[in-house]
Amino acid sequence: MTRVREIARRVSNWGRWGADDERGTVNFITPDVVCRAAAYVRRGAVFSLGLSLGPGGPQIGQGGRTNPVHTMTAVDGRLGADPDGPRYADDAVSMPLQCATQWDSLAHVWYEGRLYNGVPASTLGPAGAGRNAIDKLARGILSRGVLLDLARARGVDRLRPGEVIEPADLESAERAAGVHAERGDVLLLRTGHLAVFTRDGDREGYMRQMPGLGIACVEWLHAREVAAVASDTSAVEVIPFEDPAVPLPVHALCIRDMGLTLGEMFDLDELAADCARDGVWAFLFSAPPLKVTGGLGSPLNPLAVK
């Protein structure tokens, strides 16, 4: 943890937006940033970046995460005595909040007994997160999205499992796309790894090892002042971890120290193909989390609009 603590001192945003802040880097999304993002809508083309919520999802039961269970609670409900009168159907879903495309809350990962902004870990309990819960971001993550296609920049279909993404890789992908991630942007990272699940049908291979951000990228993200980061993998950071003795270092530094929410399991393939065709890698991005009181994460159907 020595390196984590050293980087934490340089990237900490504790107190930056006040002692009671629970939104972290989403604060970078100011009205001016939203107006700038809206100007990127030129064609009216809309791309859904979310995986379907159903039994065919990517989960393998690891850490208690399972795929959604969809139950019909009414199939032929009657509202009156008339056999030809109105009928209704109803249903319910039981699912972990982080089983498919999702945002992490700022209470999701911590260390040394403190959550983002110095909040005691004791604020977590049976009712969920008393502070830094996902509903604190419910005003919306609506901003300019910037897609960096790391696989395409390397000239490959997908990065290899365990491949570490360095700051130089992020900048190389920026140059290839002609974009520059800046304050308030939502940064989307395509590694191509989603194909291990969607094309190969290999849930285990998708969930257990993956390319991703190395710890050196944390200071790069801090310097760019991006509002959020999402990837097509289930962890955003590289697995196996660079240091086997320090699990989830990028999560720890981004969520706990920077207050930077991470998005996982985003489907970026269709959007990336369109960006490659028209040469435009920035767009209006909208992915508001559900208002789950005390939630540690939220399922999503993110949208990119060009």
Image (tube, rainbow, N blue to C red):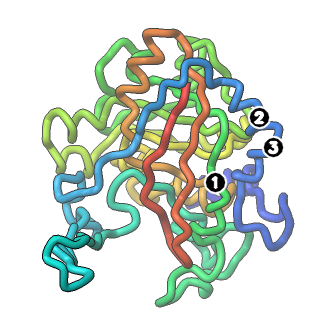
Q: Looking at the picture, tell me which residue is in the foreground, 129 or 94.
A: 94
Q: What is the three-letter code of the residue carrying label 3?
A: Pro
Q: Which mark is residue 293?
A: none
Q: What is the three-letter code of the residue carrying label 1?
A: Gly
Report, in whole angstroms, how far the alpha carbon at label 1 lies from the one at label 3.
12 Å
Q: Residue 250: percent from the left, percent from the top?
A: 53, 51
The residue identified by callout 1 is 140
Q: Residue 96: percent from the left, percent from the top?
A: 34, 69
Task: Name the secondary structure under disc 3.
Answer: helix
Q: Specify the quadrant of the image occupied by residue 83.
A: bottom left
Q: Residue 58: percent from the left, percent from the top?
A: 23, 52
Q: What is the three-letter code of the residue carrying label 2?
A: Cys
Residue 191 shown left or right of residue 54 in the figure: right
> Could you tell which of marks 1 and 3 lies nearer the N-terminus?
3
Q: Are marks 2 and 3 in contact (CB under 8 Å)?
A: yes
Label 3: few (<14), some (14–19) or many (≥20) C-alpha neighbours in 10 Å: few
The residue identified by callout 3 is 31
Q: Looking at the picture, tell me which residue is in the foreground, 269 or 260.
A: 269
Q: Looking at the picture, tell me which residue is in the foreground, 265 or 51.
A: 51
The residue identified by callout 2 is 35
Report, in whole angstroms, how far the alpha carbon at label 2 lies from the one at label 3.
6 Å
Q: Is residue 242 above or below residue 73?
A: above
Label 1: few (<14), some (14–19) or many (≥20) C-alpha neighbours in 10 Å: some
